Image (spheres, rainbow, N blue to C red):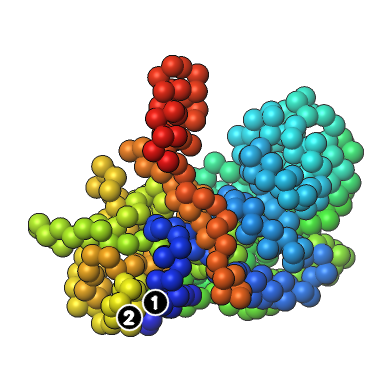
Amino acid sequence: MPAKHPFVTKDQLVTIAEHYPTPFHLYDEAGIRANVEAVLDAFSWNPGFKEYFAVKANPNPRLISILAEYGCGCDCSSDTELMICDALDIRGSDIMFSSNDTPADDFRFARELGAIVNFDDITHIEFFERVAGPIPKTVSCRFNPGGLFQLANGIMDNPGDSKYGMTREQLFEAYRMLVDRGAENLGLHAFLASNTVTNDYYPALARILFELAVDLARETGAHIGFINLSGGVGIPYRPDQVPNDIHAIGEGVRRAFEEVLVPAGMGDVALCAEMGRFMMGPYGCLVTRAIHEKHIYKDYVGVDANACDLIRPAMYDAYHHITVMGQAGGPDKSGLPATRTYDIVGNLCENNDKFAHDRALPQVDIGDLLVIHDTGAHGYSMGYNYNGRLRHAEVLLRTDGSCELIRRAETAADYFATLDITDTGRALIARAARTS
Ligand SMILES: Cc1ncc(COP(=O)(O)O)c(C=O)c1O
């Protein structure tokens, strides 16, 4: 099996873990920067191209601000995500508000910030007018073609079973409603498949949206200013997967653009994306330490992280590669052959709290550091507090090799904070304050 290497060495990690107690999410600034530069280069043929980073993938303001340095905006789906943007001075057309089942307050706040609202449903147009005010001049709509979404390499996803977006008929009607209400610059959006590890996804999606945009412009008279390819560009979680080539993806989208939009006189359309996983996934890892081993019907290694730090394996049976690094004073295990088979588990009272099952790994000893790869997107952000377990810290490995704490670990006081309305709650908060 091809190797998958952590972005830190064993010695680096031992030093980092001396300063920051495990577990913690570690991010690679150099990797984030190199990747965003590659994305922008791949789409530089489209002068209006903009990446709206999907904040849901990683809402850490420090990481978002790195992407903002390159001109990236943010794709938000809730009022708290909007607040993060506001705090970072990211406003107006630098925000794509791609929400669904949207509460009135969220629409009001999106309007206040001047965000581009991407309507998930036709009924949201009148709802928005009622709760947030007149339709802005620049707005967008989300399309759902239904059925199965297939590429040559198989079925990618099942839009017909997805709650998002509008049918084709609804989309045409929505465009007419928006034009009637004064919208001048319309956008078109779709998200048809998640974590696609193929260079064909974006080009295929682009062709669908470009052809639809030509029909929409012709039939509704709307000016289509931008087309949003959304997220879904995947990463190779498994070592045997061939990574996406963002330049091949950009070139495939360019070909569809030249073949469909340019002949229709729509060569001025700006493209945008809302990638989350591709922008951040590989540039984060969960660093954890082996604290127990247990041998019953299987061999288990208990680590100090759990599914509250990374729910993807428990939720989707998602594969995350694991590298056993070793510990201070011991050998570097990162290149050792896999001679053992383990389940790597956390401490939740849930049997799916396993970062890996039946995984071939080198011998793990108590005290060893383990790197759980590709947790930079949909990792910390999907965390939760089952069993009263707390979410841990986030640390940024800077380009100069230094480290910066970019989110502290939760404390028991954080966990109890919302109970401040009763005497018991206040007692718990005081109790937590004494132990933290
Ligand atoms: C509307 C929208 N945009 C963008 C994304 C980001 O997707 P990904 O992280 O796969 O790029 C998501 C993910 O759920 C989404 O729902």
Residue 151, visible in the rendered structure = no
Residue visible at 50% across and 23% down? 420
Q: Looking at the image, is mark 1 or mark 2 earlier in the sequence?
A: 1
Q: How crowded is mark 1: few (under 14 residues within 10 Å), some or many (20 or more)?
A: many
State whether residue 11 is above or below residue 100: below
Residue beneath disc 1: 10
In the picture, measured across the screen, residue 349 lies left or right of residue 407, that is left
Residue 224, visible in the rendered structure = yes
Residue visible at 51% across and 56% down? 394
Residue beneath disc 2: 332
Residue visible at 72% across and 76% down? 41
Question: Secondary structure under badge 2?
Answer: loop
Quadrant position of the N terminus in the picture: bottom left
Question: Secondary structure under badge 1?
Answer: helix
The image position of residue 287, as x and y in percent, is 40, 63
Q: Residues within 10 Å of mark 2 (few under 14, many from 20)?
A: some
Residue 404 is labelled as none
Type of the residue with mark 2: Asp
- Find residue 320 and report its image quarter: bottom left
State whether residue 20 is above or below residue 8: above
What is the count of numbered marks?
2
Type of the residue with mark 1: Lys
Residue visible at 60% across and 65% down? 279
In the picture, measured across the screen, residue 41 lies left or right of residue 371, that is right
* In-front residue for pair 43/335: 335
The image position of residue 392, as x and y in percent, is 44, 51
The image position of residue 409, as x and y in percent, is 47, 49
In the picture, measured across the screen, residue 355 lies left or right of residue 415, that is left
CB-based contact (under 8 Å), mark 1 and mark 2: yes
- Find residue 164 and report its image quarter: top right
